[in-house]
Amino acid sequence: MNAFTSADTMHRLAKRAMDDGSARSREEAEALLRHYSIAIVVDDPVAGDRHHQAAILAAVAFGRRVFLGGITVAGNLNVPLVTPLPFGRTLAEAVVALGGTLEDTPAGVPILRVGNGPGDRMQGFCVRLVFAGWRGGIVPNDADGIDAGAGEPMALAPMLAAALGVNEAFLHLASELPSAGRRCVGLSLWDLADPDWLDARAPDPVLRYLPTRLWLIGLGHLGQAFLFALGLLPYERPADLHLVLQDDDIITPSTESTSILSDATMIGGKKTRTMAAWAERRGFCTTITERLFDAHTRRQPHEPAIALCGLDNAAGRRTLDLAGFDFVAEAGLGRGHADFRSIVVHTLPGDLPAAKLWEGSDTAAGAIDAAAYRKLLDDGSLDRCGITLLAGKAVGAPFVGGTAATVVIAEVLRLLHGAPVNRLVELNLVTPDHRTTAPQHNDFSTLNPGFATIKSERDGG
């Protein structure tokens, strides 16, 4: 039986309130999240559409880990589940499986609306999830959405919209941003440098190629978001995708607070085995490796040439270009209460070796002197060593990893479609419009990592 430390059981977003001083105890920090709840309202005409279903399910998966007061979903959900995600036979079953509650919208809660076209102007918080082409985001409920010229949604665009919608609702409930809910926020996954994500001057490219061989490094917050996103891709034969899943850790009680495929029934299980089981239910093929990714890790010629990295430490990242991958897409997330919404994406090989990119210290700035930690020490709940361990854990929110996952996997998809990829992407979900991108200088045009073709997202492929 596993003996979990206080750090293993702490909700990673509740820790934000401990670190910034807005909560004077762990109990108070967790109580704040239990006072937060939201509603998803689904227009009946879109309930049977796979892209709208993807947005609904992603919003529930992110939201129920953030708004511990509950997430309700209203609408006619007794329709067949037509997304490829293995969560049930009907949309209603899938919503419940992911932690949502089927009931009418409670009064006074923030609303994420899933539907086509502008709705009524609302007094309270109400945003609409919008997606078309490779673009996803949110707009106020009564605002126009993405230009229809962008084309049918690429499979990751609804997930991106859901992540940004949950982020916006949390900004509103936590009173972090007065304009939350009254602004348009989004990205184009095809062209992250484009500030006009709502304005489609020409149709976005049709999604025609999907990866068939990927190595996932780390199966926590980011790794599970990668898997969720891959699960949305329209593989005609899911068994075409072979995944190598690498992690040496187990699922702890705190894992569920950031990792969208984990639940309480998995606690104590190996991340590799639980995630392989989920991927296989989706129809993918898996191989697991239960060892630390380090300088001794070597890819064999028959193994995937592309890696998706979701490590939360610099030591592992410093060895990413030593393992023999032809292409690596990795994301790093902010760790502190002030920067947990920060996302930095790299693709490798780049201009600098990995050891140079991450040559800084792994040490996280803990908030050990905050009142909540002093209380734990004073009342004897934890000793100084336990306090230090808890304070050093990262603040995290699943909607941040969800956003990062869509950006990372979009880099792989653009690579497969012969488009330029980014060497660097930096953004913060408080002000995502102020993002930085830098192009890759390496030529990947001769790389053939294996791919499957699909008819077309626009043909419903």
Image (tube, grey):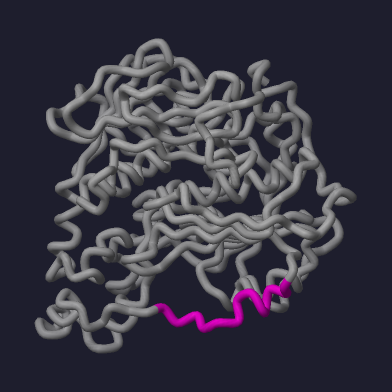
Q: Which quarter of the rendering shows the C terminus?
A: top right
Residue 299 is situated, as x and y percent measured from the top left of the image, at 78, 65
Total count of labels: 0
Q: Residue at x 74, y 57 (%)?
A: 440
Nearest to the observer: residue 205 or residue 270: 205
Say whether residue 359 is magenta.
yes
Residue furthest toward the top?
Answer: 45
- Vertical side of 46 occupied by 371: above or below: below
Answer left or right for 121 relative to 296.
Answer: left
Residue 273 is situated, as x and y percent measured from the top left of the image, at 55, 55
Can see residue 201?
A: yes
Answer left or right for 239 relative to 26.
Answer: right
Answer left or right for 139 relative to 236.
Answer: left
Nearest to the observer: residue 283 or residue 165: 165
Residue furthest toward the right?
Answer: 446
Residue 305 is situated, as x and y percent measured from the top left of the image, at 78, 56
Nearest to the observer: residue 451 or residue 287: 451
- Vertical side of 344 occupied by 433: above or below: above
Residue furthest toward the bottom?
Answer: 384
Q: Residue at x 56, y 56 (%)?
A: 436
Q: Which residue is drawn at 44% across and 24% down?
A: 145
Q: Quadrant of residue 128?
A: top left
Q: Which residue is drawn at 63% across and 59% down?
A: 424
Answer left or right for 435 relative to 10.
Answer: right
Q: In which quarter of the image is residue 236?
A: top right
Say whether residue 388 is magenta.
no
Q: Which quarter of the rendering shows the N terminus?
A: bottom left
Q: Give the range drawn in magenta.
A: 352-364
- Helix, strand or loop for the magenta stretch, by majority: loop
